[in-house]
Amino acid sequence: MKLLLLFGLVATAATYVWAIMKGRRTRIFHEPVVFHQLAAWTALITLLANVVLIEICTRIKGGARYDLLFCVHICFAVPTALAMLLLVVRLNGRRWPIHHAKLAYGSALLFSGMFVTGLWMILTRF
């Protein structure tokens, strides 16, 4: 179960980095936006699938522990998911390129905190 969760975490991180790289390449090298949009949607779907996978594994294990680590993780995870959803669905780079870039960089900082605390929880609890 731990390997499956670690695979989900790495897949989420990889698709997130892929979306960022495609966004940078779209801006710098003027690649088609379609590739960045595909990467962004893939990152969002992978994040949501990983959340469902973690919920299933937590229920199988017997429930969650609501301690400080969990609260810190949630403080990173919820804004990250909302920022990703907002970036993909509403605040796109064609209409609002400056706001999109600022929110994307803020989302990357939140994602790094979510990744570290999520990795720590997977390694210590499963």
Image (cartoon, rainbow, N blue to C red):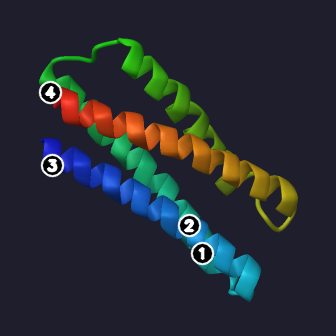
- The crowding category of the residue bearing disc 3, from other C-alpha atoms within 10 Å (few below 14, some 14 to 19, many at least 20), is few
59 sits to left or right of 31: left
State the mark number for residue 3: 3
Q: Given the image, on which type of amino acid does mark 4 rest?
A: Ile
The residue that mark 2 highlights is 19
Badge 4 or badge 1: first in the primary sequence? 1
Q: Given the image, on which type of amino acid does mark 2 rest?
A: Ala
Residue 70 lies, in percent from the top left, at 39, 21
Q: Nearer the viewer, residue 48 or 114?
A: 114
Badge 1 or badge 3: first in the primary sequence? 3
- The crowding category of the residue bearing disc 1, from other C-alpha atoms within 10 Å (few below 14, some 14 to 19, many at least 20), is many
Residue drawn at (76%, 60%) of the image: 92
1 and 3 marks in contact (CB < 8 Å): no
State the mark number for residue 60: 4
4 and 2 marks in contact (CB < 8 Å): no
- The crowding category of the residue bearing disc 4, from other C-alpha atoms within 10 Å (few below 14, some 14 to 19, many at least 20), is few
For mark 1, give the secondary structure: helix
For mark 3, give the secondary structure: helix
- The crowding category of the residue bearing disc 2, from other C-alpha atoms within 10 Å (few below 14, some 14 to 19, many at least 20), is many
Looking at the rendering, which quadrant does residue 51 occupy? top left
115 sits to left or right of 89: left
Work out which quarter of the rendered image holds the C terminus and state it: top left
For mark 4, give the secondary structure: helix
Q: Is residue 29 above or below residue 105?
A: below
Residue drawn at (15%, 18%) of the image: 62
Badge 4 or badge 2: first in the primary sequence? 2
2 and 1 marks in contact (CB < 8 Å): yes
The residue that mark 1 highlights is 22
Q: Given the image, on which type of amino acid does mark 1 rest?
A: Lys
Residue 107 lies, in percent from the top left, at 63, 46
State the mark number for residue 62: none
Residue drawn at (42%, 43%) of the image: 115
